[in-house]
């Protein structure tokens, strides 16, 4: 049975990013982002209602300060009382899960989107994705970057500007580029 490019994308397999169904999804997401990011007089409750209409899951007391950016929205799950500060970018071609009480600083970038290492596959426009999981009560400092496939354990701390290339155990503090443990 043939799978759609969207089904391949969500599964984390190579897919054609120029697929027409995905173009429609990105265009719809762009319209939603425009409304969300320009809702300057909206209350937090109004913004949360907008998030619930578009993202896969949004817990109670979630706050995402605009501007906010994502590829699709439907692959993002955010737990209770999570906070994302201004200008966060979530490339959600695969699942991105953010746990309860996570605190995410301004300009943090979380990438589930990846590209093949084979140059011929890149020339053909193929992409892939690997899920990212941010645990409960995680604190991610401003301008940190979380790369595809990374899991950040509960209660971990990611230093500002860190580039997280591998999993971070629960309770660990990491910083730097690439991020390395600095304490537990």
Image (cartoon, rainbow, N blue to C red):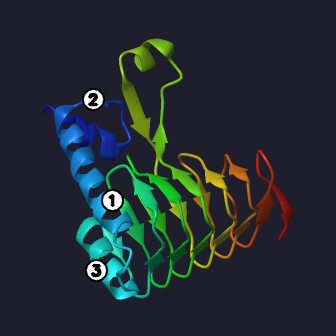
* Residue in front for this viewpoint, 87 or 41: 41
Q: Which mark is residue 33?
A: 1
Q: Are marks 2 and 3 in contact (CB under 8 Å)?
A: no
Q: Which mark is residue 146?
A: none
Give the x, y percent position of residue 179.
77, 51
Instruction: Give the residue at the far top of this rendering.
Output: 120
Give the x, y percent position of residue 181.
82, 58
Q: Residues within 10 Å of mark 2 (few under 14, many from 20)?
A: few
Residue at which label 2 appears: 18
- The quarter of the rendered structure image containing the C terminus is bottom right
First along the sequence among labels 2 and 1: 2
Image point (36%, 76%), residue name = 58
Distance Cα–Cα, label 2 vs label 3: 31 Å
Distance Cα–Cα, label 1 vs label 3: 14 Å
Image-based side of 27 in relation to 125, left or right: left
Figure quadrant of residue 37: bottom left
Figure quadrant of residue 68: bottom left
Examine the rendered structure and indicate whether residue 87 appears above or below residue 6.
below
First along the sequence among labels 2 and 3: 2
* Marks 1, 3: nearer the viewer: 1
First along the sequence among labels 1 and 3: 1
């Amino acid at each position: 049975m043939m799978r759609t490019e969207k089904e391949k994308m969500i599964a984390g397999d190579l897919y054609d990013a120029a697929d027409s169904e995905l173009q429609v999804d990105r265009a719809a997401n762009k319209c939603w982002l425009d409304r969300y990011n320009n809702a300057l007089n909206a209350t937090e409750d109004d913004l949360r209602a907008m998030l619930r209409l578009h993202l896969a899951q949004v817990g109670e007391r979630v706050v995402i300060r605009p501007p906010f950016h994502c590829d699709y929205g439907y692959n993002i799950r955010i737990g209770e009382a999570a906070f994302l500060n201004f200008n966060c970018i979530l490339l959600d071609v695969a699942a991105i899960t953010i746990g309860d009480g996570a605190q995410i600083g301004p300009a943090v970038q979380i990438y589930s989107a990846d590209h093949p290492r084979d140059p011929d596959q890149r020339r053909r426009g193929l992409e892939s994705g690997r899920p990212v999981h941010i645990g409960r009560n995680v604190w991610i400092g401003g301008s940190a970057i979380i790369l595809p496939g990374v899991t950040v354990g509960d209660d971990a701390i990611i230093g500002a500007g860190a580039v997280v290339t591998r999993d971070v155990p629960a309770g660990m503090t990491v910083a730097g580029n690439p991020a390395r443990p600095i304490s537990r």
